[in-house]
Image (cartoon, coloured by chain):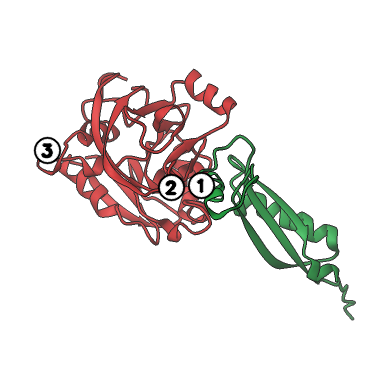
Amino acid sequence: MVTAVTVLYVNYSVIVEVTLRPGIADPEGATIERALPALGFSGVSAMRAGKLFRFDIEAVDAADALTSAESLAERLLSNPVIEDAVARLDERTLA
Amino acid sequence: MTRIAVVVFPGSNCEYDAAGALEQLGAQTQFVFHSATSLGDVDGVILPGGFAHGDYLRPGALARFSPVMDAVSAFADAGGPVLGICNGFQVLTEAGLLAGALQKNRGLTFLCQPTTLIVSSTHSVLTRAAALGQELVVPINHFSGAYTCDDATYASLVAHDQIVLRYRDNPNGSRDDIAGVSNEAGNVVGLMPHPERAMSTLLGSADGRVLLEGFIGIGVGAR
């Protein structure tokens, strides 16, 4: 007889935001900011462009999901030389 | 006869130019596909320009995980000459074989034009046949070519004479006009300009020759 040990994996929805590190020039963000006054938006500053990734990941709990997502973000989704990555749980999981 | 491996990723598009230029100089070349796990018996490796894996995510971000990159890293660690041109430079920085990163050009435009480079160090496999301060006209062809690094990395590059080429008139916002850098040992080099497209005065410039000659060991004094 073999006794199966079952680990319950749950799908967690995760969001990873990738932005350029402070101090790294962001020509995209700067261009967007410069365009705003012409459209009638005033008082906008510190505009930074970035990327957002949303995906589902199998994990035993929320902390495990975030750890995996952070590792994945560090290794592939961002270039740590110039970018910061922040992972958080998507509301869809929290609901 | 010098044998050079030219790595081909899905989306590479300068591999024939690179191989053709090297063969003009008397080297033997062989294409090595990105899925290969060995480079074969070669004296040097080139990562050519193009859009490896579509440049999805970031230029070079996916290419660095290609199976062949383990062989390239091992070859580099053993002191073998490795040259990344344009997209190849981006792959080498993503792979951590060279310091820094290549960002979108200042001005957010794709640049395709001749540039004048200044040889800033001859302690690399690419610039060892050139003269310090020599000016070379070599074309660029890129969207993400602005060399970026933090202050500590920059200080280390300067301290170890790793900035090998600078733009005379910075076209893309690169830090300190940097067009090419090497690793500390000088056997791994990356540059955004395309020396393989500067092989004949009839086509604008033959200044790429001295760089590629150095890479394959022509005109190199006692070293």
Along the horizontal axis of the image, is B44 left or right of B20?
right
Q: Quadrant of residue A8?
A: bottom right
* Label 1 secondary element: helix
Disc 3: CA contacts within 10 A as few (<14), some (14-19) or many (>=20): few
How many other residues sit within 10 Å of disc 2, few (<14), some (14-19) or many (≥20)?
A: some
Residue type marked 3: Thr
Q: Secondary structure at mark 3?
A: helix
Q: Is residue B128 above or below residue A78?
A: above
Do marks 2 and 3 share a subunit?
A: yes
Question: Which of the two discs, 2 and 3, labels the residue nearer the N terminus?
Answer: 2
Marks 1/2 in contact by CB < 8 Å: the verdict is yes
Report which residue position mark 3 lands on: B201
Chain that bears disc 2: B
The residue that label 2 is drawn on is B108
Picture coordinates of residue B56 (x, y %)?
A: 49, 59
- In this rendering, does residue B223 appear at all? yes
Q: Nearer the viewer, mark 1 or mark 2?
A: 1
Both marks 1 and 3 on one chain: no
**Colour seen for chain A:** green
In the rendered structure, find residue A15 and report the number of the disc placed on it: none
x and y, in percent, of residue B10 in the image: 40, 62
Q: Which residue is mark 1?
A: A31
Image position, residue B220 (x, y; %): 25, 24
Question: Height in image: A58 above or below B208?
Answer: below
Task: Write down the colour of chain B.
Answer: red
Q: Return the chain for callout 1.
A: A
Q: Quadrant of residue B150?
A: top right
- Distance between mark 1 and mark 2 Cα atoms: 9 Å
- Residue B186 can be seen in this image: no
User: Mark 3 and mark 2 in contact (Cβ < 8 Å)?
Assistant: no
| Rendered location of residue B37, percent (x, y) | 46, 55
x 13%, y 40%: residue: B200
